[in-house]
């Protein structure tokens, strides 16, 4: 039975998912059918806990003719396949999601509580083979239930390949991702649902006014259909071409374990009282590597650093789109 939900579809009160409580979406049609693993050997291994054979756990590697018959290796493989499939599905549903929130959403969906709940819905623990003395404890363990689900994913991957796993897990996890998406939005101080489509509009489309002409980029079409300005395209460069020489000059001197002394000289007769002119020399081990002048001390040092970089044999290319001061 699903958890009580508010108007936004989020569980309320103590059942709010936080990584320790399972996500339980509304599933009117239930979970997708559980695929059948065709290989009998794989199917048997999927449902075999290591306690069944009580093999030692400190062994580095099994012998080629006697591999471990339990499901730990399948669980390890299934964990990786599960993360791959869920990450791909998350990118498909929410292509503009940043990495940080995406990681939180995935952690909620593939966390042990949620996987354990799904495992129980599929009644996987009922088929688990284990040592009789531990049967009650292990079957009731959320960690074992989640591990068993991952083991099944790993077994299905080896049996039928990645596409078969996707065909099962994509419809299974879509409602779980939808809840986790809203939960993480709330955690970030945002409303559960965004005020804009989660999928970007197509880059080109044809409006009724453009019926006879070529399609135009969406950003060129005025009106409410135009997407909002984003950070996808960087703004034109506004940094002067000369900025940055000083830090590069200091960096190379530090790499050579050398210190620079900035010696300012008299600039009488230059500039005004409100806009003075500073003149400086870059002295390194008694040698002047560069001279510069500018309306600020930093600008003067930067001009001296440009000369110093030339004397050090360091070429600084002019970047496209830059312009001088």
Image (tube, rainbow, N blue to C red):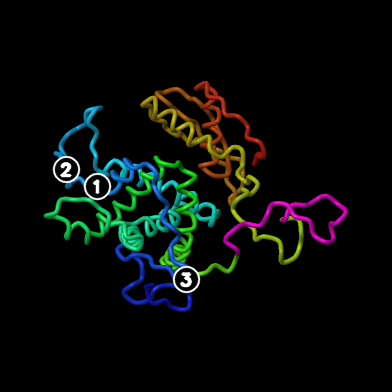
Left or right relative to 50: residue 299: right
Q: Secondary structure at mark 2?
A: loop
Q: Position of residue 102 (x, y in %)?
A: 45, 55
Q: Nearer the viewer, mark 1 or mark 3?
A: 1
Near mark 3 (Cα within 10 A), the count class, few <14, some 14-19 or many ≥20, is few
Near mark 1 (Cα within 10 A), the count class, few <14, some 14-19 or many ≥20, is many
At a point 35% along the width and 63% down the height, the residue shown is 121
259 shown above or below 2:
above
258 shown above or below 41:
above
> Dividing the picture into quarters, in which one does residue 292 lie?
top right
Q: Nearer the viewer, mark 2 or mark 3?
A: 2
> Which residue corresponds to mark 2?
53
Q: Position of residue 57 (x, y in %)?
A: 16, 40
Left or right relative to 147: residue 275: right
Which of the two discs, 2 and 3, labels the residue nearer the N terminus?
Answer: 3
At a point 60% along the width and 63% down the height, the residue shown is 197
Q: Disc 2, disc 3: CB below 8 Å?
A: no
> Dividing the picture into quarters, in which one does residue 111 lie?
bottom left
Please state the extent of the stretch shown in magenta in the rendering: 197-218
> Which residue corresponds to mark 3?
28
Q: Disc 1, disc 2: CB below 8 Å?
A: yes
């Amino acid at each position: 039975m699903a958890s009580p939900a508010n108007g936004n579809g989020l569980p309320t009160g103590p059942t709010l998912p936080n990584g320790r409580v399972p996500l339980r979406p509304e599933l009117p049609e239930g979970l997708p059918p559980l695929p059948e693993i065709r290989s009998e050997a794989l199917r048997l291994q999927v449902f075999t806990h290591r306690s069944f054979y009580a093999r030692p756990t400190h062994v580095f590697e099994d012998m080629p003719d006697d591999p471990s018959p339990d499901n730990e290796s399948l669980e390890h493989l299934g964990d990786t396949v599960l993360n791959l499939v869920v990450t791909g599905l998350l990118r498909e549903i929410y292509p503009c999601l940043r990495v940080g929130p995406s990681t939180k959403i995935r952690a909620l969906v593939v966390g042990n509580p949620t996987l354990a709940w799904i495992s129980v819905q599929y009644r996987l623990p009922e088929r688990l083979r284990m040592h009789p003395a531990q049967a009650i404890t292990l079957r009731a363990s959320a960690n074992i239930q989640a591990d068993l689900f991952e083991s099944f994913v790993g077994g299905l991957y080896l049996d039928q390949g990645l596409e078969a796993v996707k065909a099962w897990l994509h419809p299974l996890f879509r409602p779980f991702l939808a809840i986790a998406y809203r939960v993480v939005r709330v955690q970030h101080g945002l409303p559960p649902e965004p005020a804009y489509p989660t999928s970007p509009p197509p880059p080109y489309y044809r409006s009724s006014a453009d019926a006879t002409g070529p399609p135009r980029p969406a950003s060129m079409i005025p009106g409410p259909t135009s997407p909002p300005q984003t950070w996808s395209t960087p703004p034109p460069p506004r940094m002067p071409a000369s900025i940055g020489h000083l830090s590069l000059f200091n960096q190379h001197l530090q790499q050579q374990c050398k210190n620079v002394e900035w010696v300012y000289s008299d600039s009488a007769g230059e500039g005004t009282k409100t806009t003075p002119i500073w003149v400086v020399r870059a002295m390194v081990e008694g040698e002047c590597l560069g001279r510069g002048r500018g309306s600020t001390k930093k600008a003067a040092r930067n001009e001296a650093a440009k000369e110093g970089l030339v004397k050090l044999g360091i070429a600084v290319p002019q970047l496209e789109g830059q312009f001088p001061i």
